[in-house]
Image (tube, helix red, strand yellow):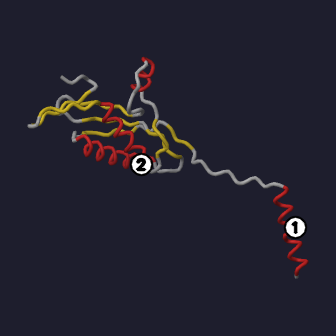
């Protein structure tokens, strides 16, 4: 019998039990592959499990199973880059998560909720520091070109 941490599926070939951590991991990976996503935030479930000393496989993802129709309800907590269109990123996350979870687990997804928890600046590479020795070399090269002319 599945616990609240597992999803049970019965077919003609027998029963399959899939842990919710396994499902959450697929959802987290699909979220991370979405352009504009920086990382995953921490859900209250993750915080609670970490406080109790348990490792939460799909950090930033909450998995629930609707008992009435046996559909998965997934909630993801992404962190996105500043400047991206948040509704567009959320829509892409929903599509990616639904597609991957259904494809790799065979379980129907009823809803994918997206709770954006943070917006972070895009990291720009720092300009190279100019050194006096590089400037001196450029000046020397320029002077040599003038002398040669």
Q: Quadrant of the N terminus?
A: top left
The vertical placement of 67 against 96, above or below, is: above
Q: Going from the N terminus, do you reach mark 1 or mark 2 first?
A: 2
Q: CA distance from mark 1 to mark 2?
A: 50 Å
The residue lying at 50 percent from left, 38 percent from top is 118
Q: Nearer the viewer, residue 40 or 131?
A: 131
Q: Which residue is at the far bottom?
A: 149
Q: Residues within 10 Å of mark 2 (few under 14, many from 20)?
A: many
Query: Residue under circle 2?
Result: 34
Element type at marker 1?
helix
Numbered tag placed on residue 140 in the rendering: 1
Query: In this view of the protein, which residue sits in the foreground, 116 or 54?
Result: 54
Q: Position of residue 111 (x, y in %)?
A: 28, 39
In percent of width and height, residue 5 lies at 28, 25
Quadrant (top left, top right, bottom left, bottom right) of the C terminus: bottom right
Q: Would you place residue 16 above or below residue 85 in this image?
A: above
Q: Tell me which corner region of the image, top left, top right, bottom left or bottom right, holds residue 40.
A: top left
Residue 112 x/y as whole percent: 32, 40
Place residue 98 in its image quadrant. Answer: top left
Q: Which mark is residue 46?
A: none
**Residue 68: x percent and y percent?**
17, 30
């Amino acid at each position: 019998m599945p616990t609240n941490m597992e999803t049970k599926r019965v077919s003609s070939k027998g029963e399959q039990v899939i842990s919710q951590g396994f499902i959450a991991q697929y959802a987290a990976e699909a979220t991370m592959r979405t352009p504009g996503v920086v990382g995953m935030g921490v859900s209250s479930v993750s915080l609670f499990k970490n406080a109790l000393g348990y490792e939460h496989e799909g950090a930033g993802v909450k998995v629930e199973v609707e008992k009435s129709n046996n559909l998965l309800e997934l909630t993801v907590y992404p962190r996105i880059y500043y400047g991206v269109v948040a509704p567009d990123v959320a829509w892409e996350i929903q599509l990616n998560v639904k597609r991957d979870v259904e494809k790799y687990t065979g379980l129907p997804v009823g809803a994918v909720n997206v709770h954006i928890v943070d917006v972070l600046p895009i990291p720009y590479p720092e300009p190279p520091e100019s050194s006096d020795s590089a400037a001196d070399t450029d000046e020397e090269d320029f002077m040599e070109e003038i002398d040669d002319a």
